[in-house]
Image (spheres, helix red, strand yellow):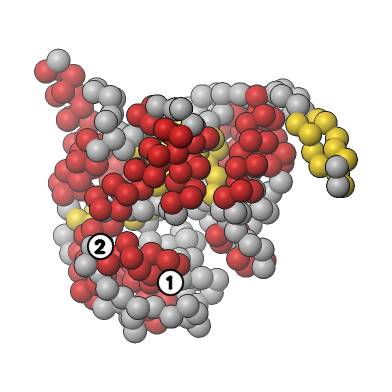
Amino acid sequence: MTAPGIPLRVGVRVPPCDRADRVVETVRRAERLGFDDVWFPDSQLLWRDVFTTLTAAALGTERIGLGTAVTNLATRHPAVVASAARSVAELAPGRFTLGLGVGNSSVGPIGLRQTTSAAMREGLGMLRALLDGREWDFEVSGSSTVRSRLRDPRPEVPLHLAASGPRNLRLAGEVADGVILLSGVSPRTLEGATARVREGAEAAGRNADTIPLTVSAYCAVTDDIEAEARRIKPICASIAQNGGATFLALAGIDVQVPATIGGVYPDLVHAEDWDAAVDICSAWISDEAAVRFAEEFCLFGTAEQITERLRALHTTGVTGVFLQHVGSYDPPSDLIEAVGTSVLPALSRTTEAKADYR
């Protein structure tokens, strides 16, 4: 359970979709409106370099938390990630979180495979050692190694693992400093995901209640869920396509999506022509299924409805959320304005009321 009196951290995902100085203007607006965190995804062909953007954001802000959601250990060697993380942490002391994942849109477009659980375990161990200032034996060939360390380490940088499958959820509970849950806000899937994290923590002798849990969720402040829900058909189709049909079925969403869908570049979640992707996915995702997906897995609704769902989410032990808008190549300016001017003030009043009561 969440410790009493500790507010839910509300963050927003900002893709590095423009020059770093322009992206920072979006981050500054989120900071002024009271967001706790901004999370930047990493995909070398889709967006500008994430650590360049983070550097600009660190220099251009004062309070807001900054994080990767997520970078990976396939296109970037763990030693390179450690150096980049150290460099950003120096510019934003106590504000940077290194979020890591299996690769997804970073590896697919260049023909690489996603990071396996075994490789992720080793990579996390290497990262932690280097950031802590400890030496690491790097394999050269066969049984030959070279021992090296990171100068000017930053041991305070937390490593958060993004996970959706049971293996990586358990791994996160076992070794990560925090978990980014990719299951959306559905109570059914969240319960299963947090149970796997707890299993990993208990196996490692850790207290699962001390591990931060951040939930990723698509969000839209709207009075017309039906109209907005239609736009997330590619998201729903991608989940079904990538092994999530069982989770969707738990929420009464029974869809069958082919393994390959043509006409969308580079993939369903990051389609450059979003309207075309919506039309294509309508062959398998009905309007009714899209609405059900929006209501169960996402934060779609009025400001009051979203505020209440965030409060309920907080009571389950979730410590943070990061909100996503639909789209990859424009900043989430409308989402930041809507949530920042209507949802965040309501959440703040709730926290202040609880503090006064105590």
96 horizontally vs 255: left or right: right
Look at mark 2 in the image and give the residue it sits on: 250
Position above or below: 306 against 202: below
The N terminus lies in quadrant: top left
Sooner in the amino-acid sequence: mark 2 or mark 1? 1
Q: Who's the residue at 42% across and 62% down the image? A: 327
Can you tell which mark lies on residue 131? none
Q: Quadrant of residue 108?
A: bottom right
Q: Residue furthest left?
A: 357
Q: Position of residue 127 (x, y in %)?
A: 65, 35
The residues tagged by marks 2 and 1 sit, at their Cα atoms, a distance apart of: 16 Å
Q: Position of residue 264 (x, y in %)?
A: 50, 77
Look at mark 1 in the image and give the residue it sits on: 241
Closer to the eye: label 2 or 1: 2
Q: Secondary structure at mark 2?
A: helix
Q: Residue furthest top?
A: 358
Q: Would you call the spot at circle 1 few (<14 residues within 10 Å), some (14-19), or many (20 or more)?
A: some
Number of marks in picture: 2
